[in-house]
Amino acid sequence: MMSRFILLLLISALGQSVYALAQNEELAAQNPDFRTLQPTWFQAKEPFRVIGDIHFVGVQGLAIYFIPTPDGHILIDGGMPQNAPLIVQSIRELGYDPADIKILLNTHAHFDHSGGLAALKEMSGAELVASEGDRSALENGFYLGYEDVPWLNAPPVIVDKIIADDGDVTLGNITLTAHLTPGHTRGCTSWSLTVEEAGKPYEVLIFCSATVALNRLVGPPQYDRIVEDYRYTFQKAANWAPDVFLANHPGFFRMDEKRARQIDGDVLAFVDNTEFPMFISRMEEWFDAALAQQTSEHGQSDN
């Protein structure tokens, strides 16, 4: 059986080290400054076009996506609260006006992905579209299951429109489809769209997350039916094989390695339809290990 220590190391390797560190309550209490716990979440990174109309405007450790259209722009995720000015700067560096953002989308209601949404919405007047499952956390600014831990909070932000599973968001020439993939949060939402590169269409998936991270699966669970939600997501995503796999942590999809190839002239550096199936299979294995470990620790059955 995988030890808790090894599991946390594996999670850390996928860009979730702050969650592993947060397991140590004493450390978290002494040093809740995320600049120390996870400095890459605050380090500026040069924006760039990933593929088609999708641009990266995030920071070293958090991926945020900007999609311009003739009728205004779409932004996916807001990073940490302190990231908002960097996101605005990156959009300007790409030659666009951040005030023209019309739609804000969110993968999930955790402070490192929703924290900047309130400031970005106030700046642009954009409509925030999110799932019902994450609505309460977004609008009240809490981390579901840790409502009494204030340093996990994010600035509250009003959700203007609820998106359902397989619901579409269209602006200009871009249509994104929502795929509810709960577990990591109750309303975890992945987004897909088709883009064109070098005269050919490519299916892109921006995956929410499936790590266990700080979540309690038992004793008591982070939220009701969390285990069933994870299993639903793994079953749902088992046969997904998008041409391009993106996520909200660059390490999930080896962004820096692919960006280096892109700079060297590989215009299809982000195209690999074998990557996501391997990723989601690994996530399920790690989930099973975490569930077994937590169940053992609490002396419960995992059935």
Image (cartoon, rainbow, N blue to C red):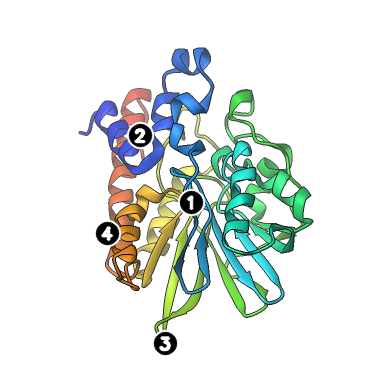
Q: Earlier in the sequence, mark 1 or mark 3?
A: 1
| Disc sitting over residue 199 in the figure | 3
| Side of 81 relative to 232 (left or right) | right
- Quadrant housing residue 237: bottom left
Q: Earlier in the sequence, mark 3 or mark 4?
A: 3
| Disc sitting over residue 278 in the figure | 4
| Side of 259 relative to 54 (left or right) | left
Name which residue lies at 33% across and 62% down. Answer: 276
Q: Secondary structure at mark 1?
A: loop
Distance between mark 1 and mark 3 Cα atoms: 26 Å
Q: Identify the residue at the far bottom of this view.
A: 199
State the image coordinates of residue 298 (x, y, percent, origin top left). 38, 24
Distance between mark 4 and mark 1 Cα atoms: 20 Å
Q: Earlier in the sequence, mark 1 or mark 2?
A: 1
Residue where numbered disc 2 is placed = 301
294, 55: nearer the viewer: 55
Q: Depth-wise, is mark 2 or mark 3 nearer the camera?
A: 3
